[in-house]
Every structure is written in C-alpha cells, then in structure tokens.
Image (cartoon, grey):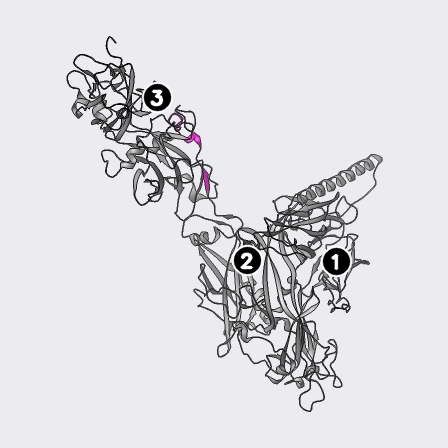
Amino acid sequence: MKKKFYGALLLGSVLLTGGMVSCSDYDDDINSLNDRVAAVEETVRGLQEKINAGCVITSVDPTGNGVKVTLSNGESFELLNGAPGAAATVEIGENGNWFINGKDTGKPSRGEKGEQGEPGESGTAATGKYYKPGENGYWIEVTVGADGKETETETTISWTPEGTMTAVWDSENGKLLVSNVKGYNGILSISLTSELKSLVFQPEFYYQGIEAMEAKTFNYTEKGVKEVNADDDFTTDAPTELDGVAMTPGLVAKYHMNPSSANWKDIKSLSYISDDKNYTRAGGVVKAKVFDWEGEEGILTVHSQLTDGTIKDIQNDGKVTVLALQANYSGSEKDTIITSDYAAVKATNYKDMVLANAALGQPVHTMHLYTNAQDAINNAASHEIVWNHEGLDVATLVQTHYDDSQNSHVAWDVTAADKTVEDYGFKYSFELVGYHKGNNRTSESAHAVMKGSLLKPCMPVDGKQPTWDAAEQNKAEKDREPLVRVILTDTVSNKIAAVGYVKFKIVEKATPTESEVILTPEFGFNYEYTVNCTETEKPLQIEWHDFEEDILAQLEKQGISKEDFHTNFELDGGNDDATQYDGKLATSMSTSKKGIVKQTITDTGAEETQIITWTLKNNEAYQLFKNNKSISVIVRYSKEIEPNVYQFVYVTLTWTPNPRNVQPAGTLENSDKIKNYWYAYNSATPGSGYSDIHANVETVGETNADDEFKSDILNTFDGNNVTVSGVNAVYTAFQDANLTKTFTFVDPQSTDMTPVKGNSGTMYDITVGDNGTTLYANVVNNPLVKQAVVKINGSILEYQGKDNETLYSFARDILNAADHAQFVANNEGKKTFTAQIQINAENCSYVPFELENNEFFAKFLRPITISDPHETNFVDATTGGAKADLKLTFVDWRDHNFDNASVTKGQNYYKYYDVESIAQNGDIMTDLNGTTGVFDRKLSDVTGKVKFTFTAPTKSEIQNGNGIVNHYFGTLNYENNGTTVGDFQIKVPFDVTYDWGTIQVYVICKISQTEAN
C-alpha cells in the first residue's frame, strides 16, 4: 500500500516499571513529570516557531526513543515515546481507504462533491463521505454537499489503537497528530502551516512589459435543449439557437504566498482593488469579484468574475486596467488585510465554440462532434467500447474548439477530463439519448448506463435502462450503439454554449484504430551535481525492483504479462542509445538527446528484469542544469498490435540534484594587492585605496628603456600573481591552482569614461573589441572610422601610438589631452585617460566563474607636460628690434624637470622623449584695447601694424642646444607700427611634438610700453 496525503509513522513502546516509593520519591516523580511536560512544551514551541517562520516538515521518522520531525531548513525535533503497548500503523491503501495495521477500515480518505444543478434546479446529493483523523483521537466523518460544502461529525471510533504511540502526518488538513507522547496528555497537534504575510503576483505573460493576466471573453450563441432519457425515442433531438452571449467568466490568477507554508484555508475572503492608469477617454473601472480559490505548494490560485466597467487597452485607450488582490486573513491574534502587487488585465476574445473529438494529430476542423442526434445516428460510431468495460470516461474523448484572439481555430483543452474549462466558469455534462433502430422496441442507449462522464455497457431490464449499480453485462450487448449528448455549460451565466453528439458501438473486442499510450511511469533521482569541467559520467539507474513495481506490475493490471512485455515491447532506438521524445502522447516526436539512455538485463537470481540507465557527461549536465533545477528525458517502449498501430509505454527519468552546484564563485582579496602600487579612486596618493593603478611609459635611464608605454598589471599583485580565494570546497575544479586568470576591458558605454575629449578638442567615443582586449576610439558621430587606443597583451597594458601618427592619431590626441595628475576634468572638460579593467578566472570557458572585487581602473599618465614659465617678454621700440627666446618648462610623468640636473642625473630627457619640433600654430590672441589679462580678440583683428613672427628651432637645437643655450626652443620677433604704445599682452599657441604626439601649450608674452614713454 502507498501512503498518499497522509504518512503514518508508528514506534515501539517503552515499558513502564513501578514499586514502593517514599515521599521524597513522590517529589522526585512530580519534578520529573514537570520536566517532561516542560521539555515537550519547549520542543513543540520551537517546532511551531520554525513552521511559523516559513519552514515545512519534510519527514517524520521513527527513532529509538520516539519520533524525529525534520524541517526544510535541516533542523530536527524529537518527541519521546510514552506508550507501553505494541506499535500500530495508520495509512491509506491502494483503494483509497484508511488501513490500520494493514487492515481495511472501509473508511474512504477522500470524497467528491455532488453535481451542480442546472439553472433553476437543485444539485444532486453528495456522492459520498470520507474520514480524517480527529484531534480527540476519533475519526471525523466528513460529508460533502453538492455545493462542495463540507459537514464534519465526530464519531466514537478511535483512530489511535490503545496503548500505542501513533503519528499521523496529515498534510491535507495541515496537522501533525501524535498520540501517547511522553510528558503530554492527549493527542498532540502541531500545525504544519504558518500565517500568510504577503502575496506576490505570478505573471501569466507580460503586456507591454507589465506583469499581466488574461481576461477571456467568450462569444457564443446560447443553445436550448430538451430533456432526454435513455429509453424513449429522441432521434430528432437537436439544440435550438437562442440569443448571442458575450460572457467574460472571469480571471484565473496565481499568487506566490509568503511564506510558502502559509495556510490558505485561513483566508476568510478575497477581493480585488481595480484601477485604470493614464486613461484619457470615457469608461468605467472594471470590477472583479472572487468566487473561488485554492492553494497548493505555496501558490494561491484565485478565480474571479468580472462585473461592470470596461477593460482598458493600452493601444486603443492609452491606459491599462490593473488589479491588486486583497486577502482577509484570519491570523492567530487578529484578522489581517494583505494586499498583493498590481497586475495588468489584458482582454482577449474567443468565439465559435464547438465540441469535438479529442483525436490527437488530426486537423481540428475535421474533429467536430455532430450537432444533432440524427446525424450521429445515421453515421458510423465514433468510438468502440467492449461489452464488459467497467466504465469508459467519455470526458477523455471530447474537447472544445474555438477561434482564438488571432482568429485561429484551435483546441481549448486537451480533453474534457483535464477540467481546463472549469477555470473559466464552464463545465461539461454527459447524458444518454434514447433512440430506436429498426423494429427494436428497446432503445439503443438503454444498453448502457452513465455515472457522471463514465459510460458502461449493460443489459436492459424489461426493455429499460437499469441503474448503474444494478447493471449487468453480457456479450449479447454486442453491436448496440448508445448515443451520448455532451453539453458545455457556462456556469456563470447559466447558459448552454455548445452541444454535441457522439455515438458508441459496443463490441466483443476493441478494434485498434490508432496507437495508444497505456502507461507513463516516472522515476526521479536527487543525486548531487557539481560542475567540474570534465567528461566524467554520472549513471542514473532504475533498479530492477522499481522496474518491477512501477512498470511490470502496473501492466499486469491491464492484462499485459511480464512475458508479453519482455517479448513484444521494444525500446525505441535500440537498447544502447534509446530515442528520446518531446512528450508522452501517441503522436510525440523524437527530440534532441540529453545524455544516453540504455537498457540492460539483470539477473536477480530468480528471473531476469530490464534495467534502464541514463548517463550524462558532466559538461553536458552543466549546460542543462545551469538554468534548470531539474531535467527530464522520456524514452518509449513500443508494441505493434496492428499494422502501424502501437501500444506505447513512456518512461520519464527526472534528475533533480540536491544540492545543485552550478555557480562556482570566488573573490579577490585586497590583501593580495601590493598596497603601495594602488590608489583610491582619482587619488594621487599611493596606498590610499585599491581602486586605481597608474600606467606610465618606461623610466628614463633604465636598462633598454626607449619610452615604450607598457605596464604589467601583475606588478601590482603580491608575488606578481593573482590569487583567487573564498571558493567553496565543493568546487574542486575551480580552486585557485586550477584557474586561468585573464584581463579584459569593461565596456565603458553608459559611463562617464566615454566620450572623452582629445588634446585637439575633438570628442571620441570609446568602445571595446577583440574579445575585450582592445579599447577603440572613433570621432563622435563617425563610428565607421576607429583606431586602437590601448591593448591588453596577457597582463601587459600597451598604449598605442608611439612614433606612429598615421595609425594612432586618435590615441595620441587622447593621451595628450591632460596633465598626468589631471584625474578630474578641468574647465575644458579634459582629464587623464582612464579605462576600467576586469580580472576573469575560469577553468573551462563554458562555465562562468563569478569573481568578486575583480574590477579596477587604470589611468594612463601623459608622458610629459609643457608649461609657460611667463619669461618670454618684450620692450617696445628696443634698439635693433624686440626679440625674445621662447621659454618653456618641460616635466615628465614624475614631475621631473628636464633641466634639473639633480633629477635628470645626466640623462637627456629631451632626447629620450624625442622632442622633435616646436611650431607656432593658431591665432595669436591679445588684450590690446581691452581688459588686461582677457585674451578675447585676435591680434590681427585689433591691428595689422603689430606683428609677431616665430623662428622655429631644429630638432637638434631642442635636444642639444645651439651653443648659446643648452636647449633652444626658438625665437619670437616683435615689430611695432611706428607709434608708441603702452603695456599689453599676447597669448601665443605652440604645438610641441614628441614621440607620443603633440601637446598644445599657450605662452603669454608681456610687451612693456615704449622705452622712455
């Protein structure tokens, strides 16, 4: 017997002993009893607190001392055994009844509600009763009414055998009931559920990016039908068409309950808050009235009916209708109103509903049921049923079609049995329609009875249909053709939406007409999975006894023997690599394989049985598990029973790893960095933080140095190596020694690192290419022309552009835009060029390794800076003309002055940096006839009589001097217009070119008033 909703766990007893005791012994006994009671109370309190916090019970297991209750967080609590008698078991058997110690009590564990009546009629009585264990130790008899309402009555029959410790895990009613707990008097009841704290909408789809639910409107013509029975003649029965109906039965919405263990049955009522957002046209706000709800596995499913108002459409109305669910929840202390998030409602229209055969694989328009009795009678039967069938579910043979919102004619449900239509306020009903064939005085339909949707052949009694329970079967029923009328009713509007007729033929033996699926067993595995970058294989095997119990034994119940299965059923694709399928239907197709499924034969000693083994390689499993908590494969056994007609057994194998280790991760500790090489963001102080490193050209005077711009990132790490730490020990393949570390640029788009301004004033957009190892620049709005700026070669940062103005003019312009210490943009918007770099670690390229603290910034320091020392001055009307040698100050990225012997130490910095030319380039600006120090006019615009010319130096003169000075930068010549003049100034632009490009420097020259004037 299998345990279903309830699992019973019974333990052995602990014998009690006694004897003569003293008064002090009584005190000890009382204290001991108090201690035991306190211990039970403490255990229950701790257990209940965990459940209230959201934990769920995952198992209730026997121990040597009592019962151990294990929670989903791994914690466990023990209740001690206080019973002196033998053990007992309480469980649900295969027939759905309660069993005690293996004996059937005759008490069903569940019941069904009665049939709902047609409009204006009463519903049928309850179909039965069921029982559940009560908290007083007695069975509770539950009667289910036609409306689903349950009435409970406590019986006088005990579910816990006297003198035993009995544990019943009643997950259906949310209780753990334990009798004879040591230190506790009575039945200990522990709630398995917690209080609801919040509701989060689970979107059905996204409507213009908004979480949304669908509001279906069904358009149909109401049908009228006459009352029929199985005995009289209704050959001409057909529905009449009435008025058109446009019915929106409501919404089916799902909400995550927080915590997932919350008791949804404590929800007293549900309602919706509705609103229309950003609407500018007329129309009322739609209202939604909740009429039903249920919960399962942390999901609350809510059914509601829409009334009033109009659902708004974003495209047509410029507004969207939204709903938020409000739950009136009955908590332990007081009732609470809990409100969910808002969700959009999207209206869709469906029309032309028609009943059809659920014949899979056929075009939908060819499957419709006959719409009147005469047509069904005049044509061949749609289905066969063997004379001794115990009850064929007609609901599995029919479905509903409609035109969807895209005007495609499609199937609404798979079959009526799946109850899809009930979520939208519809239901199916089935009834036999009597008719006479030839001279027969007995109706064809009297040879069958129906119970709900179940159809069973039978012999009439005195020419009339018997009751279900009194029906007797005989081969004489053969060739009779009962007729069933199927009705689809809109239960919200109490109107009939569609009617169809289906005729059956009673046969001695069913004639196969199409392939069928006769068994779909499922097998689960929860073995751990850990990604490890290897081809190692994990075989998952169905053991022989599982194959026996879940396949062979189940086929035996259908009359298929073990020998028949071994002999006639073959594994599709062969025993070494079975074909895998995309579903479990007769029409399912082969699909791409996940691993290999094989079949072998095992010898158990007494007999041979198939064994199925599913093998996955580690790297393939990773691709499947990285985004999925579980994966499944479906294989199929086939038996050909007629040409091209098969019986199928689909076997589903599902692997749900526990744990599932697919996200290796680590961190880069700042302690792995050499502090003195690192800076805080935009700081010039070494050791101030771990955000920035500074990249520079080679240092003057070092061995083989020739002003290359190459910086090794590893120089900034302890031991000149990046070390990854903090990797979970379970990821053996991703420990530091197994990881390859690489460096790439972070895309600067949407950051303040692009665009950047060059020395020339040109704006450049910065992008990443070459798999993250090259930064490119293009002039803004001209992306077709781009040049490399910086490359990463291994761990080496290589700035581009030395001695090559043609290929790397953008890189040179960007590098020379700002002084090496200009980390924040100056008033011209220029700053030291900065790139963001990411350290990556991996073992195999297909497994992302999450690395924390792995990004930093590199600032590329301009090699030299040139400034005006304000020493280039003139006196007007000087005898022989006014001339002045150009004075400039050169410093490198370390602030070393090129002319300071104490730092240059004999090295010619001008030659090392290859300062090759100085040219006057651009308009000379002046403050003549203006405000002193404000250079807002061109000198040529103020006067054409005052001129300056520049005599440029040669490369040799710059680097080695001209005999007069050590380093000659050229001469400015001043010419007056023959008229005396007062003090004024000019601002002269010069371009200084060296091996890394051109730097523009402005020199301000002072012209003193005419001598003696």
- Indicate which disc, 2 or 3, sits on the residue closer to the N terminus: 2
The reply to whether the C-beta atoms of the residues labelled 1 and 3 are less than 8 Å apart is no
In the rendered image, residue 891, in percent from the top left (x then y), is placed at: 28, 22
Q: Quadrant of residue 490?
A: bottom right
| 671 is within the stretch colored magenta | yes
Taking 38 as reference, is 361 left or right?
left
Q: Which residue is mark 3?
A: 934
- Indicate which disc, 1 or 3, sits on the residue closer to the N terminus: 1
Mark drawn on residue 132: 1
In the rendered view, would you say 437 is above or below 356?
A: below
Between 900 and 239, the one nearer to me in the picture:
239
Q: Residues within 10 Å of mark 1 (few under 14, many from 20)?
A: many
- Identified by mark 3, the residue type is Val
Distance from disc 1 to disc 3, alpha carbons, whole Å, reads 97 Å
Q: Main secondary structure of the magenta part?
A: loop
Q: In which quadrant is the C terminus drawn?
A: top left
- Magenta span covers which residues? 665-690
Distance from disc 1 to disc 2, alpha carbons, whole Å, reads 30 Å
In the rendered image, residue 515, in percent from the top left (x then y), is placed at: 53, 74
Q: Secondary structure at mark 1?
A: strand
